């Protein structure tokens, strides 16, 4: 459990340093992962079982999107594939701003819990609101030091320089989700600057972006802490319900440099940042809480020119940029950029001019839509918050957090490959799936199996368990349209199955049946039959046939299928041997034929 | 002491006694309650408040033992109280009662004080005459040609309530002079401590980098007593000074035998009225006669300070008042609020109807000076001026500024090869209080001029107190008996030198024969 221990270490630290009452520590939520997995087609875990309302809306959108995609694939598919010939001429530049909710016990400036306590199921609306969160007259913000820890872990993990002194500023705008009439953020002096995110082909960066190198570095301009807004729900045509539970929950905003030149890389950046944040336990990932949102700045310029000479974030020579706000999935990031690139090229090729404006994107749309132009821009009137003293972060704290930082995804993936002999793809998938829950399950199972068998061959059992956890369980999830949270099988049960299999007490076929059986039982683990019991009752234990019995079975099948025998013997179609093995397994009594042995027997008889 | 001095002194005493008698007469009149209601000093009363305008004496559960046991204290209505409304004298908060007591109110109760009533003010503390109040203007007990004088502002209600004996002491707030100016106009003591010494938790923000809770009382002794009960760190106010900072404050010094008093040359302005100038000079002379030394000092940024203040305070106000949208509490317009058809932005109607003219004026000023096109020329420049004002003060005080790091102390007086001063003495306001009629005729800018002497100490966060000094002799020529009988003199000390300022004020009070 080495790496598991590593990954939970900072939680102890956080708990030790937290001033809020015990027991309100937040746990990561799995939701967003399932969502982006769908977009990557890694599993088909459609979260039908989830009751959360935003997800239902999401599913609707997703269905719409698929429909639209199917339609689009018929006529404009090459735009999606990125083979637009115009891209030879035009170069895309993208900068991303990511907002992620920090994993903290309390809000940024009040001691109100950031998330409902366990068992409260989301909490009643407006139940976690301190007087400051409701902007009552005479109240003041009180910076909660504990919220700094996950923010610092994120900054360190993204290679940023943590600033000794940073400040708090007010960003003003009127909206009912903003009780004070301003958001407290770090506009003039962010707490972290100048980081780097390194991506490789395995992160989804296309070869054209790598230019022959192994990896690509994208600069992180800065990270700032800020308050989240209240949640508003539209009820009826002109009524909104405002829930202040989320108002004041701490966010970090991560701003990349405009160094991204393809939609795929943009999505890869967001994905990677999300994975890094999760690996250091910096963020909650619940989509329904707005766990992660991205705004993208998109511009195009003719290759080899300096566009219209625009510049931002210190990068100059760019085309005029537009901003697309509020993208809440990796798919949306990629698609919105593709659409906006297309639109800008259309405008430019027609001799038009791109206007600096804010645009929106909805899942399934083919075009971004104009939200407001420059003249409609809100002047946020940024002003230092006079109530709050500057934030001073000691070198010692940063050093302590750096030395206790858990393994980052790239390191973790290397560890999984080295220790358990997993392939790069499997290691990556394990880390990415289900907010790390799948990885925990995998490691627990490996440890249990090895303890039971009394082996120390991590590589052998790692590969075996990896295969079962990823592919067998993954297949079941796909077939039954379930998500990981619904899986009732315990690591102990999988261990029992795999130990039996390893000791040749059952065949692989039986092992798979047992897994499927347990998978479909909805009852709690202690009320369902043990694996041992299932094997006994089903009479599934391997009763090895004698050599004679194998031969007898094989001969019978060969006699019934002379054509197949001929095909192997005369035409040399060795593949047909496996057909015979299959027949033997099927014809033999359940749990009696081992495929390897059957293959050996068939091989011998055919060659004769 | 010369014979002439003797004569002048006795004349002054007579004059002052006459004025005291007049006030006492006002207080004792059978129509006292009626008179007090006319002045409109107090706008919300507790249940223990009698119709005669005093607290029921035979309180069944008198708080015992506290330093302020049984003392009635009025609270400016922009400081929250659980049991009385807190409206900040604005329609925006009409009927609003806070769910919590401000820390200063809590401390007063803890020390046995009776929170008697809420005092009138200019809405949100924005004004110098307590005329911009949704609860109606407050009036000074003094009048000229039958027209009431301005009580000063914005803590005019607190000052008048103290002057009329409606309470033993009162809390006000001072952002640019809002405690000192009404104290000067009403003839009472008004103290603004160093910024961050008294908690602001529960103080409705106006300009939160300047807002300070202040104390008004009839004597320095009373003010000191209240201050002693309120002084302390409060974790709920992030700008409350920590104990470690306070440890760097100057030790209370008994230097009262030979106080070094600074006289800022820039305060000798043309706008200074003869009565104020004469009283100021006489007071300086009196201090010198008693062994204290006078030193001309220069505070060159004084003029710019007022402009800087009227950029910074509205800027912060525009931000602090953004929360009043009528959604969670407070006034809300009937019918729909935003009207995109008439291109009215969100909350425009609610805020337009809820805020008074002066508040709207300052919000607009502030929104402009913070806008991206203007911030560099206004807000940033004003911040720079503010820093210069602080540097001016650091350059004249003997005591180094405890907020500066030791290597920043190069600007201190010691470096310039001369001894600094202990306190500065200036008039609190350039003129005697105008009548409310005159106030009405004033433009906003003219009315802002009133704050020219009080604003610099606010910008630098310094402790400052206004002590009434009786008018005497020729100063009162042609004045009616109903007119104001004293001039406010302001003492300003180095940051954290609150004790010294209070001691110097006591001394001034004694010299004036009031003690």
Image (cartoon, coloured by chain):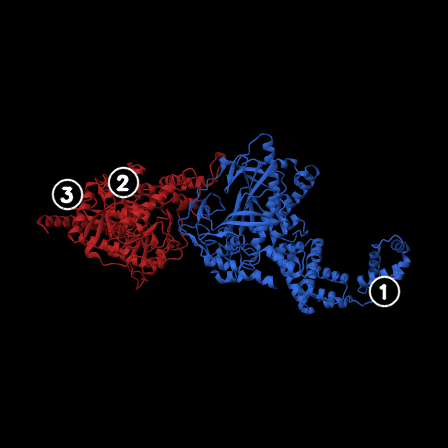
B101 to the left or right of A518:
left
The crowding category of the residue bearing disc 2, from other C-alpha atoms within 10 Å (few below 14, some 14 to 19, many at least 20), is many
Q: Is residue A273 left or right of residue A490?
A: left
Name the chain under label 3.
Answer: B
Q: What is the x, y in percent for residue A561?
A: 89, 56
**Numbered circle sitting on residue B436:** 2
Observer able to see residue B281: yes
Q: Which chain is represented by red in the image? A: B
In the rendered image, residue B398, in percent from the top left (x then y), is placed at: 26, 53
Q: Position of residue A570 (x, y in %)?
A: 89, 53
On the image, the x and y values in percent for residue B162 come to 26, 51
Visible residue check, residue B178: no
Vertically, is A429 above or below A188?
Answer: below
The residue singled out by tag 1 in the image is A550
Of tags 2 and 3, which is closer to the observer? 3
Give the secondary structure at mark 3: helix
């Amino acid at each position: 459990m080495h790496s598991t221990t590593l990954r939970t270490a900072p939680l102890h630290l956080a708990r030790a340093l937290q001033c809020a009452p015990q027991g309100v520590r937040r746990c990561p939520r799995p939701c967003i992962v399932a969502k982006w997995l769908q977009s990557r087609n890694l599993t088909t875990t459609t979260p039908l079982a989830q009751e959360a309302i935003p997800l239902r809306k999401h599913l609707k959108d997703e269905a719409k999107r698929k429909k639209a995609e199917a339609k689009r694939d018929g006529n404009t598919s090459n735009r999606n594939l990125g083979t637009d010939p115009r891209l030879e001429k035009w170069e895309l530049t993208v900068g991303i701003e990511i907002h992620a909710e920090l994993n903290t016990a309390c809000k940024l400036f009040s001691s109100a819990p950031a998330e409902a306590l366990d068992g409260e199921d989301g909490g009643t609306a407006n139940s976690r609101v301190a007087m400051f969160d409701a902007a009552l007259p005479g109240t003041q913000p009180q910076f909660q030091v504990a919220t700094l820890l996950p923010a610092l872990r994120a900054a360190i993990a993204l290679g940023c320089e943590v600033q000794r002194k940073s400040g708090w500023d007010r960003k003003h705008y009127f909206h009912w989700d903003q009780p004070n009439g301003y958001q407290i953020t770090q506009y003039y002096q962010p707490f972290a600057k100048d980081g780097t995110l390194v991506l490789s082909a395995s992160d989804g960066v296309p070869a054209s972006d790598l230019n022959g190198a192994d990896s690509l570095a994208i600069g992180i301009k800065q990270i700032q802490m800020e308050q989240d807004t209240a949640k508003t729900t539209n009820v009826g045509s002109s009524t909104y319900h405002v829930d202040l539970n989320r108002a004041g929950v701490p966010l970090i905003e991560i701003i990349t440099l405009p160094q991204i030149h393809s939609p795929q890389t943009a999505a890869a950046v967001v994905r990677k940042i999300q994975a890094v944040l999760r690996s250091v336990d910096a963020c909650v990932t619940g989509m329904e809480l707005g766990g992660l949102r991205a705004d993208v700045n998109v511009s195009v310029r003719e290759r080899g020119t300096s566009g219209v000479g625009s510049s931002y974030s210190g990068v100059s020579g760019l085309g005029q940029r537009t901003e697309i706000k509020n993208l809440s999935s990796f798919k949306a990031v990629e698609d919105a950029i593709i659409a906006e690139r297309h639109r800008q090229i259309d405008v430019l090729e027609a001799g038009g001019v791109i206007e600096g404006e804010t645009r929106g994107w909805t899942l399934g749309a083919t075009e971004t839509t104009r939200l407001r132009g420059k003249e409609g821009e809100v002047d946020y009137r940024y002003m230092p918050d006079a109530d709050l003293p500057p934030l001073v972060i000691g070198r010692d704290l940063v050093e302590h957090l750096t030395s206790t930082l858990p393994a980052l995804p790239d390191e973790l993936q290397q560890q999984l490959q080295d220790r358990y002999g997993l392939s790069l793809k499997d290691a990556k998938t394990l880390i990415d799936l289900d907010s790390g829950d799948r990885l925990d399950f995998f490691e627990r199972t490996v440890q249990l199996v090895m303890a039971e068998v009394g082996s120390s061959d991590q590589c052998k059992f790692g590969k075996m368990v990896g295969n079962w956890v990823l592919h067998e369980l993954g297949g079941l999830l796909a077939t039954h349209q379930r998500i990981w949270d619904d899986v009732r099988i315990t690591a102990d049960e999988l261990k029992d199955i795999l130990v039996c299999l390893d000791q040749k007490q059952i065949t692989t076929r039986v092992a798979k049946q047992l897994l499927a059986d347990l998978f479909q039982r909805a009852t709690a683990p202690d009320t369902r039959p043990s694996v041992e019991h299932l094997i006994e009752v089903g009479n599934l234990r391997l009763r090895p046939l004698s050599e004679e019995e194998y031969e007898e079975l094989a001969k019978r099948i060969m006699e019934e299928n002379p054509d197949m025998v001929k095909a192997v013997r005369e035409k040399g179609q060795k593949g047909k041997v496996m057909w015979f093995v299959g027949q033997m397994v099927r014809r033999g009594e359940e749990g009696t034929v081992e495929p390897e042995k059957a293959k050996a027997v068939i091989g011998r008889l055919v060659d004769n | 002491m010369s014979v002439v001095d003797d004569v002048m002194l006795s004349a002054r005493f007579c004059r002052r006694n006459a004025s005291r008698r007049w006030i006492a007469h006002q207080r004792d009149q059978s129509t006292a309650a009626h008179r007090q209601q006319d002045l409109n000093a107090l706008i919300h009363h507790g249940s223990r408040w009698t119709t005669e305008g005093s607290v029921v004496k035979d309180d069944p559960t008198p708080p015992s033992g506290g330093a302020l046991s049984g003392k009635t204290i009025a609270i400016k209505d922009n400081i929250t109280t659980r049991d009385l409304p807190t409206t900040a004298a604005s329609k925006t908060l009409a009927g609003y009662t806070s769910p919590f007591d401000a820390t200063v109110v809590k401390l007063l109760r803890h020390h046995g004080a009776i929170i008697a009533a809420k005092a009138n003010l200019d809405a949100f503390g924005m004004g110098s005459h307590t005329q911009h109040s949704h609860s109606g203007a407050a009036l000074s007990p003094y009048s000229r040609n039958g027209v009431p004088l301005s009580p000063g502002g914005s803590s005019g209600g607190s000052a008048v309530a103290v002057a009329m004996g409606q309470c033993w002491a009162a809390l006000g707030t001072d952002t640019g002079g809002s405690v000192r100016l009404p104290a000067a106009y009403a003839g009472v003591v008004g103290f603004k401590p160093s910024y961050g010494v008294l908690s602001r938790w529960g103080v409705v923000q106006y300009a939160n980098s300047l807002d300070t809770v202040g104390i008004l009382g009839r004597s320095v002794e009373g003010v000191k007593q209240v201050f002693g009960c309120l002084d302390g760190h409060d974790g709920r106010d992030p700008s409350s000074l920590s104990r470690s900072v306070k440890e760097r404050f100057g030790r209370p010094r008994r230097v009262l035998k030979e106080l070094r008093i600074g006289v800022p040359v820039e305060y000798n302005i043309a706008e200074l009225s003869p009565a104020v100038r004469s009283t100021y000079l006489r007071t300086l002379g009196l201090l010198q006669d008693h062994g204290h030394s006078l030193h001309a000092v220069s505070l060159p940024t004084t003029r710019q300070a007022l402009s800087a203040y009227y950029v910074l305070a509205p800027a912060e106000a525009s931000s602090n008042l953004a929360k009043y949208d009528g959604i969670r509490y407070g006034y809300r317009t009937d019918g729909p609020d935003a009207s995109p058809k008439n291109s009215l932005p969100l909350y425009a109607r609610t805020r337009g109807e809820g805020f008074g003219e002066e508040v709207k004026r300052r919000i607009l000023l502030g929104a402009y000076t913070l806008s991206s096109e203007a911030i560099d020329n206004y807000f940033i420049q004003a911040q720079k001026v503010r820093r210069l004002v602080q540097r001016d003060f650091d350059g004249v005080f003997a005591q180094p500024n405890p907020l500066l790091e030791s290597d920043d102390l190069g600007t201190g007086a010691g470096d310039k090869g001369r001894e600094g001063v202990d306190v500065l003495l200036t008039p609190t306001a350039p003129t005697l209080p105008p009548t409310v009629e005159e106030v009405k005729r004033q433009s906003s800018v003219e009315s802002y001029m009133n704050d020219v002497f009080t604003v610099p100490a606010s910008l630098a966060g310094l402790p400052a107190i206004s002590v009434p000094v009786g008018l005497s002799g020729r100063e009162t020529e042609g004045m009616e008996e109903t007119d104001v009988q004293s001039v406010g003199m302001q003492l300003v000390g180095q940051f954290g030198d609150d004790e010294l300022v209070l001691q110097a004020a006591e001394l001034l009070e004694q010299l004036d024969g009031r003690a």
